[in-house]
Amino acid sequence: MRSHCYGAAMPRSADHTARRAEIADAVLALVARAGTEGVSLRSVAAEAGVSMGRVQHYFTGKDELLLHALARSHQRMETRIETRATATGGTDRDVLATILDELLGEHPETRDAIRIHAAFATREVDERARAILTDGDDEILALAVSVVRAAGSPDPDTDGYALMMLTSGLSHDVVLHGAPLDRARRTLRAALDRLAPVS
Amino acid sequence: MRSHCYGAAMPRSADHTARRAEIADAVLALVARAGTEGVSLRSVAAEAGVSMGRVQHYFTGKDELLLHALARSHQRMETRIETRATATGGTDRDVLATILDELLGEHPETRDAIRIHAAFATREVDERARAILTDGDDEILALAVSVVRAAGSPDPDTDGYALMMLTSGLSHDVVLHGAPLDRARRTLRAALDRLAPVS
DNA sequence: TTCGTTGCAATGCGATCGCATCGCAACACT
DNA sequence: AGTGTTGCGATGCGATCGCATTGCAACGAA
């Protein structure tokens, strides 16, 4: 290639990715606060402190806006989990314990992510949204299964799945019903100790 | 009392409760299909096959409409659980097993109820809605705790709570993510066998 | 400088929203 | 029969929705 543009004029450019991120964050703030119903092009623009024209410029429509925001939320949560998991290190069991604990919703951003997750889950079935929502679950499930298997579980698939589902139920209770976090954490720890006792 | 109305004319009367029920059912059908976002006075009227004026006549506003529908859904679910539980009878453990199994969402109406439940849970915090959503949970929790205590659990509160939360997580996975019901049922049964083995 | 493209604010449009209002038929009373 | 109340269909209003259109300032290439 001679150049990245052939004889065309290249006018001023903004950081496309950063702008989209700012707007998406505004969407997430709104969704975390009052579900997806409170999201409109205008409310998003107001929340982000920008004009509605800008929102329209960076997203083709409301659907893409919501989908991008969901993907962003999910990705950030995965990153946060990954970071905490690798930071603490330790055995697979320790890593699993860290991940599940993170999923309980202690961190405010995780709480928001869970709320956002739940809000999207109750919407009309969208293939792409579904894919985003369940992305990464397989890896955690596989880890849980391998941990309980290593701990000598007679039915690792079932027990690993149970750990995940228990965590899911607990996080919903904490985030959506305001259940006490310490009880959830105690409950999760007890289950983990039972299904995969420290050797 | 001479009469139930003093000198006032009593015009034609409709079955107030039944009409409200019909309309509320239309709301529930809509919510189960596409979340609370698809609910409008007009869409409800269309779903119920009645005029919008009628909807307005029986409900003072959208909020009351949604709240009544939620209460109705919740109450029907409680009734269904109660019925199945008393029908099967047996020990407390059997009753608990029946209740939790019912909560997994095999019955279509239960699936809808779970979807409706989830849809409302992600909305703005409303004191009354919150109260309706969590109504009855205490009884089931108390039952679960008593069952695991009778089974000799060292920490009945935690274990009973864990059973409920596991059930909650499983039902969400089944209803909202389309997870296989039989796996969920197997998982729940395994947990129950572990925490409260058949004597 | 000129020109062409992009970034984005502003505005308008048709649809839909929740809700208020009005009007009238149906019926229970006197 | 007359009368008043209720059930409820019909219609209109202002607000808000997603989206399309327009206009222009800013800036890079020629």
Image: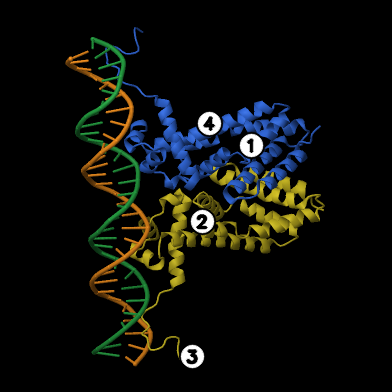
Chain colours: A blue, B yellow, C orange, D green
Residue drawn 34% across the image and 37% down it: A51
Real-space Cα distance between discs 1 and 3? 66 Å
**Left or right placement of residue D16 versus residue A67 in this view:** left
Percent position of residue A89, x then y: 70, 26
The kind of residue tagged 1 is Glu
Badge 3 element: loop
Asked if the residues shown at circle 2 and circle 4 are in contact, with their CB atoms under 8 angstroms apart, the answer is: no
The kind of residue tagged 2 is Asp
Badge 2 element: loop
- Mark 1 or mark 4, which has the lower sequence index? 4
Real-space Cα distance between discs 2 and 4? 30 Å
Depth check: give the residue in front, A177 or A197: A177
Q: Which numbered tag is attached to residue B1?
A: 3
Which residue, given by chain and number where applicable, does mark 1 sit on? A102
Tell me if I can see residue B51 in this picture. no
Real-space Cα distance between discs 2 and 1? 27 Å
Q: Which numbered tag is attached to residue A75?
A: 4
The numbered mark 3 sits on a residue in which chain?
B
Is disc 3 in the same subunit as disc 2?
Answer: yes
Residue drawn 70% across the image and 42% down it: A188
Using the image, determine if residue D28 lies above or below residue A137: above
Which residue, given by chain and number where applicable, does mark 2 sit on? B126
Using the image, determine if residue A10 lies above or below residue A149: above
